[in-house]
Image: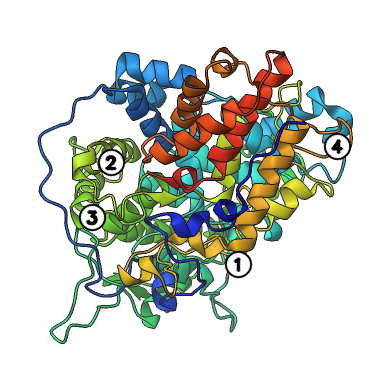
Amino acid sequence: MFVSFLPKARVALFLCAAALLSSCGGGGGDSSLQSSGQGVGAGGSPPALPPPPGPNADKPATRVEAARFLNQATFGATGADIDRVMSIGYSAWIDEQFAMPRGRTFRNWYLEDGVNSNRAEYLDPNSDRESAAWFTRVTREPDQLRLRMAWALSQIFVINGGTLMGGTALPVWMDLTADNAFGTYRTMLEKVTFSPVMGNMLSYLWNRDSNGAVPDQNYAREIMQLFSIGLWELNQDGTPKLDSAGNRIPTYTQADVVGLSSVFTGLALATGGDRKGTCIGYNGKPAQGEPEYIACELSVWNWTSTKAKSFLGVSIAALDVAKLPANSEATIQAYGRKNIGIALDTLANHANTPPFIARNLIQRFTTSNPSPAYVRRVADKFVDNGNGVRGDFKAVLKQILLDPEARDPSQQDKAIYGKLREPLLAQVHYSRVLRASDGKGNVWAGSGGCKDYHGVISELERPYAAPSVFNYYRPGFSPASGEAARRNLVVPEMQITDTVAVMDWATYVKQTLDRGGTGCSGGARRQNTFDYGELLPFADTPTVLADEVLLRFAAGSDTATLRANLVRAIESVSGTTSADRINRIKIAVMLTLLSPEYRVQR
């Protein structure tokens, strides 16, 4: 057991101390803005920063700069990651990640690897193996940028784990986001639309527009509101367009929802005939049984709507079924699929989509309140990657991470720049840097009554299991009072952060360090252990140990005061044994993880 050094006032109020988030009050902000995913009210965007300078030096000048970049682009900077970026530079590291082969799939880990490596515990119904599949991949695998982009996409194209259709649905959706993380927006939109997981989530499976049935409008509304164009017309820099009276302009009407709902009809699982042979299961063989069909695309059946449709200024002519010859099911199906393609093309090519998606992605990687100039530069890359390709996620990602507002401190308004680390990312970062493992190649988040996980993280966030299609929190959320509200800023992650969550996080960090790793407190069952080997060489020199811990967890923050406190705390643990050295590491890690310098990612 290591010596506890935990100033209670600092723990209870650390969010209030952060310059970005000095409001501890709750609040809802403008509910319409929360739903739309837009920023704060009309005309309420932060003022634009000065024009950016010329291109930044591609290689970081310091290890702190490299670690800060990695904490934006990955699930946590390790010493080896920092060395690599220092060696080859930002752009080459991104290109290296783009070229890295797709790692082990979530579905294979879930159905094969996890079972074979840890069979008894893995098959326990309380094992939370979907989360374990995700935690294992994101903390251990090298394709970090792909996985971080997959997580970002999952918070735009949101599914709810509690409403899914079978045990493999969650890993299947995890793979969908990872497989398309470096593709194009248009492809992602199509994969989402033809996914049985989303079809079940937003109730358009078996959607009909015939025999008196009224098409379900759920997906038609959310694909516009949340997945593509948002509620309000935007300028290319993400600021709202205004009419002559100074009011925001809606992007769509209820008539557009009705018209689009008729397009998303006729979609259902392929369940027989030769279609079954074209549906490949997780093991590369033809799917056998309903769970494996979740991994397959939906088919368009011959009860798709053949009526005329109109939406967003586009009209689709009716198909005169009476004039078709007998056995014309294939013609009707092709008509339905073509209509869906027209709808997806319309949304992907809409003028609102580039700034809407750009702002959402920036918020997931670098800062909650990007300047209009930053949004414009990313949106411009969405429009054209430089080679005439629209919606290229690689080009968009590179612009987000290498933009002067992300890399050049002189281009950042330090009073508003950065983002609150959401609970799940904080836990993963912690586990990745300390190389959490159960000794069998897996990382367990904790489950089956493990209060350290379910009491702190799961009630706020579980991987790919947001409580609704509006995600765990809204991109436009702003506290009702305090400094953020006064500055008209958004703080999305604050919607799931309150005093109880802060204190629970403090308890979680201390308890897991006490136990030597995350997981259940009772015995070794699904118990992870931490590996302190990377920090042990520094454990006998307090100033160096403090610097190395801050490098990995709080790079980019103003840590002068925190560093002094860490040094004093480390010096308070005397002794030369291995246990003494590990205790010095634990106390430095604990105090850093409970600080505003850590929880606000700069």
Q: Amino acid at mark 3?
A: Ser
- In percent of the image, x 17 and y 36: which residue is there? 386
Q: Which mark is residue 123?
A: 4
Measured as percent of width and height from the top left, residue 437 is found at: 70, 26
Image-based side of 355 in relation to 335, left or right: left
**Labels 1 and 2: the sequence-earlier one:** 1
Residue 166 visible, this angle? no
Mark found first going from the N terminus, 2 or 3: 3
Q: Nearer the viewer, mark 3 or mark 1?
A: 3
First along the sequence among labels 3 and 1: 1
Residue type of the residue flagged with mark 1: Ser
Find disc 1 in the rendering and name its residue.
203
Q: In whole angstroms, how far apart are the C-alphas of marks 2 and 4?
A: 44 Å
Image coordinates for residue 333, horizontal then vertical, percent: 50, 57
* Residue under pointer 2: 406
Distance CA(mark 1)–CA(mark 2): 39 Å
User: Which circle's residue, 4 or 1, is located before the other in the chain?
Assistant: 4
Q: Do the residues under discs 3 and 1 have CB atoms within 8 angstroms?
A: no
Q: CA distance from mark 4 to mark 1?
A: 30 Å
Q: Residue at label 3?
A: 371
Residue depicted at 26% across the width and 36% down the height: 407
Left or right of 278 in this view: 43: left
Q: Secondary structure at mark 4?
A: loop
**Residue at point 52%, 51% (across, down):** 422
**Measured Cα–Cα span from mark 2 to mark 3:** 11 Å
Which sits earlier in the primary sequence, circle 2 or circle 4? 4
Mark 2: amino acid: Ala
Position of residue 394 relative to residue 166, above or below, is above
